Image (tube, rainbow, N blue to C red):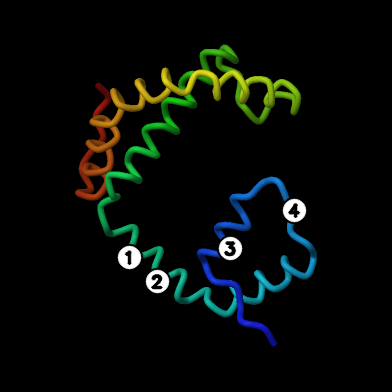
Amino acid sequence: MSKPMGLKEFIKVVESPDEALTMQQRLKMARTFKKNKAKIALGRKRAERRVASPEKLKKRAQKQARMTILKKITKGIDKGDLSMSRRQSIEKRLDKMKPKIQKLAKKLLPKVRKAELAKKRGGTKSDD
């Protein structure tokens, strides 16, 4: 039997949208994750206690900025309620707006960091 797929390989497979998983790959991943579910759960618990890294915070800020612009474009309609073709066209528009998104993300970063610290301290979240 071949070596089970590691987390890094799994992430590579999942994040490459150009090719779908075969049934064999899907079953192999299911077995691997079932075998390692305790380790994964333990790692998740540890990560929850730790304060997010600056890279993770940047990613969160970018996601928030992207969602903010998406809400403006769709006039408040949920992304899930849009048709696939409309969603694709909006994604293309958002890809063209990358500099604007990054600029907004940079402005949102302190707010995201503050929210993360408040969450870790167990404090109340304030709306600015």
Q: What kind of element bears circle 4?
A: loop
Q: Which residue is mark 3?
A: 10
Residue at the right extreme of this rendering:
23
Find out whether the residues at labels 1 and 4 contact each other: C-beta distance under 8 Å. Answer: no
Upstream in sequence: badge 1 or badge 4: 4
Q: Which mark is residue 20?
A: 4
Is residue 82 rendered to the left or right of residue 112?
right
Whole-percent x, y for residue 68 in the image? 46, 21
Mark 2 vs mark 4: in front: 4
Q: Give the quarter of the image for residue 55.
A: top left
Upstream in sequence: badge 2 or badge 4: 4
Classify 10 Å Cα crowding around label 2: few (below 14), some (14-19), many (20 and above). Answer: few
Specify the quadrant that holds the C terminus: top left
Q: Marks 1 and 4, how far apart in space?
A: 31 Å
Taking the spot 27% from the left edge, 44% from the top edge, the residue there is: 54
Q: Nearer the viewer, residue 38 or 85?
A: 85
Find out whether the residues at labels 2 and 1 contact each other: C-beta distance under 8 Å. Answer: yes
Q: Which residue is mark 2?
A: 42
Which amino acid, mark 4?
Ala
Q: Give the quarter of the image for residue 87.
A: top right
Upstream in sequence: badge 3 or badge 4: 3
Q: Marks 2 and 3, how far apart in space?
A: 18 Å
Q: Which residue is mark 1?
A: 46
Taking the spot 25% from the left edge, 52% from the top edge, the residue there is: 51
Which amino acid, mark 3?
Phe
Q: Marks 3 and 4, how far apart in space?
A: 13 Å
Q: Marks 2 and 1, how far apart in space?
A: 6 Å
Specify the quadrant that holds the N terminus: bottom right
Find out whether the residues at labels 1 and 3 contact each other: C-beta distance under 8 Å. Answer: no
Is residue 63 rendered to the left or right of residue 127?
right
Which amino acid, mark 2?
Leu
